[in-house]
Amino acid sequence: MEDIPRLGARVVRTEAGDVAVFRTAGDEIFALRDQCPHKKGPLSQGIIHGKRVTCPLHNWVIELENGQAVAPDEGCTGVYPVKIEAGKVLLGLKQA
Amino acid sequence: MKEKLILIGNGMAGVRTLEELLKIAPDKYDITVFGAEPFGNYNRILLSPVLSGEKTIDDIMLNDLPWYEENNITLHAGKWVTEINRARRTVRTADGIEENYDRLLLATGSNPIILPVPGKDLEGVVSFRDIHDVDAMLAASKSGRHAVVIGGGLLGLEAANGLRQQGMEVTVVHLMDTLMERQLDRPAAGLLKSALEARGLNFLMEARTEAILGEERVKGVRFNDGLEVPADLVVMAVGIRPNTALAEQAGLYCERGVLVNDTMQTYDPRIYAVGECVQHRGATYGLVAPLFEMAKVCANHLAHLGYARYEGSVISTKLKVTGIDLFSAGDFHGDETTEDIVIKDAAQGIYKKLVLKDNRIQGAVLYGDTIDGSWYFQLMREGTNVSDFRDQLLFGQGHLGDSGHSGQNAASAMSDDMEVCGCNGVCKGDVVNAITQKGLFTLEDVRAHTKASSSCGSCTGLVEQILMSTLGNDYSETPARKPLCKCTDYTHEEVRHTIREHHLTSIPDVMAYMEWRNSDGCHVCRPALNYYLISTWPGEARDDYQSRFINERVHANIQKDGTYSVVPRMWGGLTNPAELRAIADVAEKYAIPTVKVTGGQRIDLLGVKKEDLPAVWSDLNKAGMVSGHAYGKSLRTVKTCVGSEWCRFGTQASMGMGVQLEKMAWGSWTPHKFKMAVSGCPRNCAEATIKDFGVVAVDSGWELHVGGNGGVKVRATDLLCKVKTEEEVKEYCGAFLQLYREEGHYLERTAPWIERVGLSYVKEKVVEDEESRKALYARFLESQKFAQQDPWAERAAEQVDRHEFEPLKEVV
């Protein structure tokens, strides 16, 4: 977990594409497919605030918990289950 | 147990308050609504199009019945509340429903004024306030021929126009000798009257109604001079009066309206009131913009947040008669202490008048061309001193500086399929549909839903015009006071001032001290706060990379596919074979797909993979090149022409000057990007007069120009002053940069900044006051000590922020 900066994100490369792993100010960890539902911007590069991330391309705001775009924008990106054990981040790569 | 909230009055102000409340405290109350009309909440502003047949009642519903169910609101539609018992905290309807409350919200609106003349109760005499009235008018238009509208104000003219479109012969009767005298001066009213006459309306001016004639049904109207006109329908539109009956019955203090304080509370603190029924600081309001401002404040207090205050509204008026554009605001008559600026072109149907006092706009009347209405209104509310551009004021914002964006500027002349927003491909029809179907009222709403004007912003005026013409007199403007973002109510200035006064040096400190609503802010405020902190406390405030936009975090420009572009600095636009060779080698080694020359005389390497960035930089560093900051809100480039070093026309060494300026200013963070250029003679081949700071050499020295922009809206620079030596050029440039750095709002370019503060102000600080200039320059040089480290070298050689450029893990 320490490898991810607070209010930051890192990328896990997988065969099925990149997964963005986010760490909030409160040390919660979330994982989303690293693609904005709008124009596929890399969400891992966005600014994280609360439990949301703002896409760097066109400022869509995406909920980290469920991958939904915040209204009035509409769209959704894939969510991956995450577990923390003794400071280690475990990622469920079968897409939830 | 939840508290019980009762709303009396199922109209726009009351329901808007509930919507605002549900946004911030969705589970606080059990909500019950009483409404006298048997509908959900509809958009009263759009009654005119219903009357003229352009829309139906279903089109103008804002909250239909399922909305109340979805939000667990009990709606008693078609029920009159006749009694409030404040001791027992209950309300009771005419047919005996009784409910108790913890908090009560009154939004009883207003009643039309009915002239006390004989015959006022005859069948066929109506007002123009609700669906019921519109139904009665439509019925009359089918059976009868003649309509008389009493009242030549906003509402009366809209009613008259609608009835005319339904095929009736319409006569408008007005007590005064000019129409809409509260909104228009005499010339504008004259133009309006001619235009309406051309559409077939008849007018009787200075006519006092004596009696309405008829047995059961209206047959005609008689005036005090004895004239009688036939009428199958009479519409009374002489004004409205706040509906205070229920409040008075309950013993709440009322004057013209129900008295409320700045928190929208009546004399009984459990009872709030909003909308047309209230009187606040002596004023009553009949337009929707103030009502929505009240709704926001009221919801804030109902939610127990307790920090919002309503301080009254300045209002403007537009007429919603298809094809006639009208705007008025403030005191447009003026007196002996004011001055008028007027344009009148009767043949084109254009009239514009501004009333100025001490070079500040006091009032405005626009007829025919209203595109600049909201601009004048903003200048008026903000009390901007217009002396610097007074000679161009009436030509409009588009003519300030230069010609501007060449798009459409008259929304009414556009068809539905014409493009409004070129960035996001939004047509006029899209905007109109979103406004009517989604019930939008503000520019912000339209931006959020359609994206129109949300990118470069050059079509903002057009979108506002469409809002105006769709909603008419009632569209609600963006408030004059612009909070920094949704996390706070404080403005940019207040935040900056607090950071300086209280010596705040970190984002969490600012957010705690200024009571930010979201603990780590949002993507709008965090970059702004980070800039304000590092520019106010250089060397002391820590640069928070997680609060920077990705480009400034990784020192390259993100592209649409997630790759990056790299632009090495070339001082003054000069390069050499070694640098070019290094660039060529890098492009080949890392298989960089596109190499392009930029507008700022640099070379751009596009399509670099993020993980290759440190290695690319390392190779460029080895050839002596550093970051070009093409990605930052920072000094970008200094363009130069060859100048006297080579050119047969050159008067000064512009390349050398450009290199000196760039060496001095590189690395500095600014509110928005900052571009410079130096031309060696007045032929100005470096295009210095569309830069933030442009230098043009003349035989006797250097002309310094500021506030230019070659982007969205072309704006030529203003001449700041003329100086003699290169050292002076640097001093003035540094001082100007520092003034902008200290006072510009984050993401505000120098052009709008100068238009906001005025060129005179900048001249005063940078040119006239030598002490001020030297102090600014010294502060700039001081802050540069902390700014001039090459971020590429830090990352390439010193491995700073390595995590940014490596994946966390590869699972393949």
Image (tube, rainbow, N blue to C red):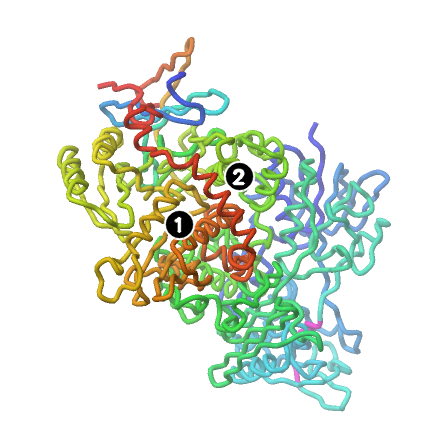
Q: Is residue B88 left or right of residue B467?
A: right
Q: What residue sits right under mark 1 in the picture? A: B674
**Number of disc labels:** 2
Locate residue B787: give its quadrant.
top left
**Residues at discs 2 and 1 both on one chain:** yes
Residue B139 in view in this figure: no
Residue range of the region highlighted in magenta in the rendering:
B230-238
Q: Few, some or many C-alpha atoms within 10 Å of disc 1 (few <14, some 14-19, many ≥20)? A: many
In the image, B634 versus B149, the foreground residue is B634
Relative height, residue B349 to residue B436 (above, below): below
Q: Chain of mark 2?
A: B
Q: Secondary structure at mark 2?
A: helix
Position in image of residue B76 (x %, y %): 67, 46
Position in image of residue B760 (x %, y %): 54, 62
In the image, B301 versus B798, the foreground residue is B798
Q: Chain of mark 1?
A: B
Q: What residue sits right under mark 2 in the picture? A: B536
Q: Residue at x 49, y 30 (%)?
A: A50
Q: Are marks 2 and 1 in contact (CB under 8 Å)?
A: no
- Residue B711 lies within the magenta run: no
What residue occupies the far top of the structure in this picture? Answer: A86
Q: Secondary structure at mark 1?
A: strand
Q: Please, what is the three-letter code of the amino acid marked with disc 2? A: Thr
Q: Please, what is the three-letter code of the amino acid marked with disc 1? A: Phe
Locate residue B71: give its quadrant.
top right
Position in image of residue B638 (x %, y %): 33, 51
Relative height, residue B261 to residue B302 (above, below): below
Query: Spatial distance from mark 2 to mark 1, Cα to Cα?
Result: 18 Å
